[in-house]
Amino acid sequence: MTIFPRAATPALLQVESIVGRLAGRAALQEVCRFLRSDVRTYRWVGVYRVEGAELVLDAWDGPAATEHTRIPISRGVCGRAVRDDATVIVTDVRSDPEYLACFRETRAEIVVPIRDGASVVGEIDVDGNEVGAFDASDGRFLEEVARRLTAAVRAAASDPRPGA
């Protein structure tokens, strides 16, 4: 789906508003909810944080939880985005041998690193239910969102886990 600058600008302002009033996992959770509600093709949105050699799911919004709450950086499309320090767009997950299946209806995925300086500290993971759901404009948009989430990802590392 093409995200035009006219639509991206107000969305980015909303993300800035969220991270300006919330911190840590609360901010990440609200950003996931907002992105999923604002962009029709974003059927599941999650934010993972790098913790050692793993990605840890800190926040998500979608119709169901994923079983992949911890992903080794050595595995999957999510791991590839961290290893390559690059946005990964998978047009059809059924043709990507690295894809870790979460939901039967998922057909496309985009994963965007969240950086703190030169280090990848997390990532935004978005699933779509149509082949080709994401394009370069989604990548540019989510890279701008990622730039605004660095502090929230860092703060999430020290947030106590619910029920802990």
Image: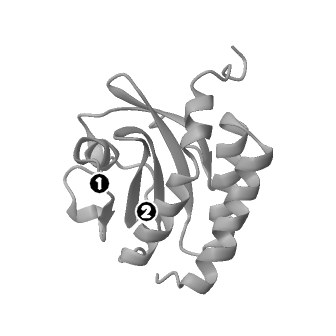
**Picture coordinates of residue 14 (x, y %)?**
72, 64
Q: Residue at x 39, y 55 (%)?
A: 111
Seen from the viewer's position, the closer of residues 17 and 88 is: 17
Image coordinates of residue 91 in percent, x first then y, are: 30, 71
- Percent from the top left, x then y, of residue 66? 51, 43
Q: Are discs 1 and 2 less than 8 Å apart at CB?
A: no
Q: From the viewer's perspective, is 110 left or right of 23?
A: left
Looking at the image, residue 124 lies above or below residue 116: below
The residue to which callout 1 is attached is 86
- Graded by Cα atoms within 10 Å as few (under 14), some (14 to 19) or many (20 or more), the crowding at tag 1 reads some
Compared to residue 41, the image places residue 101 above or below, namely: above
Name the residue at the front extreme.
117
Q: Position of residue 160 (x, y in %)?
A: 68, 19
Name the amino acid, label 2.
Thr
Instruction: Kindly state the secondary structure of the residue where label 1 is placed.
Output: loop
Residue 34 — which label?
none
Type of the residue with mark 1: Ala
One can see residue 135 in this view: no
Q: Is residue 90 visible?
A: yes
Q: Which residue is mark 2?
A: 106
Q: Earlier in the sequence, mark 1 or mark 2?
A: 1
Figure quadrant of residue 72: top left
- Seen as rendered, the residue at the extreme right is 21
Q: Quadrant of residue 143?
A: bottom left
